[in-house]
Image: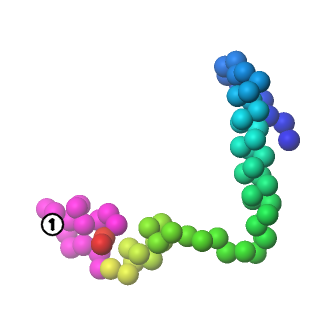
Amino acid sequence: MTIKVVRGNPTPEELAAALAVVRARAAAAAAVPPGAARHRDSWADPSRIAAHRLPQPGPTAWSRTYWPG
């Protein structure tokens, strides 16, 4: 893996911190088995919207089109 600084002049400590974050994320991603299901928050679940009726057209319909509830 190659990391290239595109802009700026980071200090060695800043580069070490950035590399530590990248390596930790890569290790965490490698630790999850390929077929394992990921946990989704209910806030991001699209079925949360589909479970409710769509708003009826009207002057206040726009206020009811975001996450209901």
**In the rendered image, which quarter contains the C terminus?**
bottom left
21 is higher (above) or lower (below) than 56:
above
Residue beneath the point at 76% across and 67% down? 32
Can residue 23 be seen in this snapshot? Answer: yes
Q: Could you say which quadrant of the image residue 52 lies in?
A: bottom left
68 is higher (above) or lower (below) than 51:
above
- The stretch of residues the image draws in magenta is 53-67
> In the figure, is residue 29 to the left or right of 55?
right
**In the rendered image, which quarter contains the N terminus?**
top right
- SS at mark 1 in the image: loop
Residue 65 at x, y percent in the picture: 29, 65
Residue 26 highlighted magenta (yes or no): no
Residue identifier under label 1:
58
Residue beneath the point at 70% across and 28% down? 14
Can residue 5 be seen in this snapshot? Answer: no
Q: Residues within 10 Å of mark 1 (few under 14, many from 20)?
A: few
Q: Residue furthest front?
A: 13
Tag 1: amino acid: Gly
Residue 43 at x, y percent in the picture: 44, 67
